[in-house]
Amino acid sequence: MNSFVPVDQNAFQEKVKFMLPNLLDTIHDEGQINPLQQIAFCLASCNVISKKEDELIGDNMDIAIFNFSTAQLRQTKKKRYFHIQNQEIEVVDTLSFLNSLERMSVIVEIHGKNFIYCKGSPEKIKNICRIVPPDYDKQMDYYYTKGFRMLAICYRELNKHEIEQPRDVKETNLVFLGFVLLVNQLQTDTKQTMAVLKEA
């Protein structure tokens, strides 16, 4: 993973290349989770990775994003838990990636509250968010032309009734959090190969 482009008050912010300390602040006294924390929690938990003998198992892209979040994974036979400093994220359910939807989601519990975190192609995620920045398409095209692979992430809080609703109901009216930028490994390898050839 290269970096993350967060959104605040429906406007894109500067790229974040490393998970900054202010993303990991403690929960506010009133029990609310701020948008930067939601980003960190989504990056940590929206995946299907597991651990075997202290080795992470799963898709390389998922592992790269998880490592960027600085979280730790703990799992039992039936549950997965992600830890970021003093915050624990319990995965309640996983909505697997579908090619037709071009996205995946997890339902989590944090401090007694349930949230859905979703990631997928920017083109598809845009359609399930309640609002996106006015320059969404422009920013998306910009990073594509720079050679990045991209994912978009979003979330919302769920009440107990909504958890039992169909997937298409849960994955709607979400809050857009930003773009995940990933280095195109093929492009990187090609550049390295070209450099070697020039030196030969």
Image (cartoon, rainbow, N blue to C red):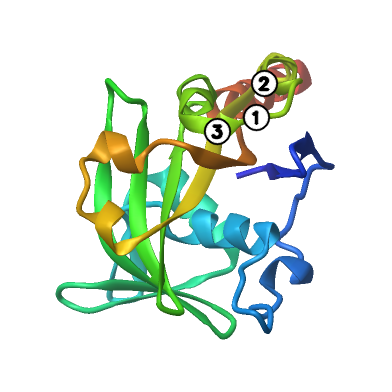
Q: Quadrant of the C terminus?
A: top right
Q: CA distance from mark 2 to mark 1?
A: 12 Å
* Callout 1 crowding tier (Cα within 10 Å): few <14, some 14–19, many ≥20: many
Check disc 1 and give the amino acid type: Val
The amino acid type, in three-letter code, at marker 2 is Met
Of marks 2 and 3, which one's residue comes earlier in the chain? 3
Q: Is residue 131 above or below residue 80?
A: above
Quarter holding residue 35? bottom right
Which residue is label 2 attached to? 140
Total marks placed: 3
- The front one of 38 and 175 is 175
Element assignment for label 1:
loop
Instruction: Give how far across and how far down residue 122 sits, in percent.
Output: 54, 25
Q: Nearer the viewer, residue 160 or 23?
A: 160
SS state under label 3 = strand
Task: Establish if 42 lies above or below 50.
Answer: above
Q: Which sits earlier in the primary sequence, circle 2 or circle 1?
A: 1
Disc 1: which residue: 132
Q: Amino acid at mark 3?
A: Arg
Q: Position of residue 67 (x, y in %)?
A: 54, 60
Up the image or down, 148 lies above or below 57; here it is: above
Residue at point 26%, 45% (across, down): 95
* Left or right, residue 195 beside residue 110: right
CB contact under 8 Å: marks 1 and 3: no
The Cα atoms of the two marked residues, 1 and 3, are separated by: 7 Å
Label 2 – label 3 distance at C-alpha: 18 Å
The residue that label 3 is drawn on is 130
In the image, which is nearer the foreground, mark 1 or mark 3?
3
- Which residue is located at x 25 percent, y 39 percent? 167
